[in-house]
Amino acid sequence: MHKCFFIGKPMRRFILHIVAIVVLLVGGGSSLSAQELRLGADFTTLFDNKEYAGMEGDVSGTLFSARLTPKVGIAWAERNELRFAVDMVQDFGHNAKFLSDVNVQLYYAYRAPRVKLFAGIFPREEMRGLRQPLFFDRSYLYYNNRIGGVLVRYENPNWGDSYVEFAMDYTGMRDFDTREAFMIMSSGRMPVRWFYMGYDFMMGHYAKDHNPETIDGVVDNLLLVPYIGFDFEARTASRPIRFDFRLSYVQSMQRDRINEHEWKFPFGGELFAEVEWYDVRLSNRIYVGRGSLYTYFDRYGGDLYHGLPLYASDKGIYEAVTLSYGRRFFEDTVGVAAGITAEYNGTAWGTRQWLQVDVNLDYGISLRRKQQYIE
């Protein structure tokens, strides 16, 4: 699934160039006020096991991998930052390989109280929306933890932390092998006390390669999910119990321009209910729709659809009952999440278990130019 390669001379030369740019910015930016050198590292290890014997739409398998992301950047004028990072992934079991995959992050970030802007190749976690599995599966998010493009978000804390955001992720450059692929994404949410409403939207464009052994096609895939919900707490003697109920309408528009020409309109509804107590969550997700939500999954698979493959079932149903635990420790630097899910897609029941540990470290070093005085 991923190319395995060593860090050769071109990559080492590229990394040295980036470090040199950061050093020049730090040492020569006399016009930049209140500069800060930011150093850090992110670490994630994920165990994700699927037991899908007898189910249609996906296969059993185990993902067990670790990713280390050292990062360096420079911040100035309180709200601006340039950052460079390297994602180094090692899949467990690749004992003869030095690294399974290496990717870079290169981006500019502007963070104001109400406006956030990211441009370049930046962490996907900077985007707040599209958290539902019908958009992105857990394994896809792990191996594709970056957005290459732009993200802008407006937040209004006076309206219960409401926001609206827009992002573009360019995932395939047009060439003789991959042609082009990109996603335009948007989401918004507005809570009012215990009630909230919002939407998630994604428009995917995918142009299949010209390999004569594969199907050639140009596909448009639009998915709009407006929702309403109730999020509230019930007081107890020890710790409050949180309840979350959300009802979503799922509307898709899909067209394979070369092979079929006409639009397809699969749609459905999804009910999500969750209760949380002492960092333990019990949830139930039920989707019911008309036919497969991923119309061309048999033709293009994960190249076009990045969500949970079980939504591709032509039975038009998906249910998941999940028991999970998640908590952060040591001043929010270490996170632990684990869970087990029983899933059904109209053909059979399967289970999925996962364990994830992540570490996030960030340090800032204030940089000030030495003042010289002449008497």
Image (spheres, grey):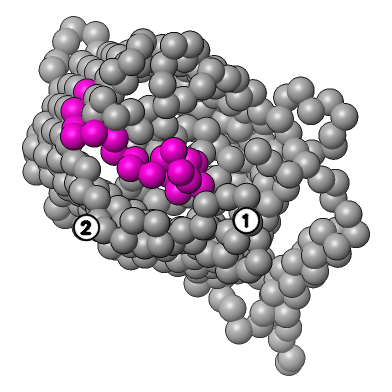
Q: Residue at x 36, y 62 (%)?
A: 257
Q: Mark 2 belongs to which amino acid? A: Asn
352 w.r.t. 161: above or below: above
Q: In the image, is 247 to the left or to the right of 352?
A: left
The picture places residue 348, in percent across and down from the top left corner, at 35, 11
317 w.r.t. 3: above or below: above
Q: Which residue is drawn at 82% across and 59% down?
A: 11
Q: Distance between the residues labelled 2 and 1?
A: 51 Å
> Magenta stretch containing residue 238, yes or no?
no
The picture places residue 266, in percent across and down from the top left corner, at 22, 43
The picture places residue 29, in percent across and down from the top left corner, at 67, 79
Q: In the image, is 209 to the left or to the right of 198?
A: right
Q: How many marks?
A: 2
Quarter containing the C terminus: bottom right
The picture places residue 168, in percent across and down from the top left corner, at 42, 63
Q: Of callouts 2 and 1, which one flags the residue occurring earlier in the amino acid sequence? A: 2
255 w.r.t. 326: above or below: below
Q: Residue at x 66, y 28 (%)?
A: 65
Check the image and name the residue furthest to the right. 9
Quarter containing the N terminus: top right
The answer to whether one can see residue 148 in this image is no
Which residues lie in the magenta part? 286-306
Q: Where on the picture, by quarter, is residue 320?
A: top left
Q: Nearer the viewer, residue 248 or 255?
A: 255
The answer to whether one can see residue 18 in this image is yes
In the picture of the structure, the residue carrying the numbered disc 1 is 212
Q: Where on the picture, by quarter, is residue 20?
A: bottom right
In the picture of the structure, the residue carrying the numbered disc 2 is 156
Q: In the image, is 352 to the left or to the right of 232?
A: right
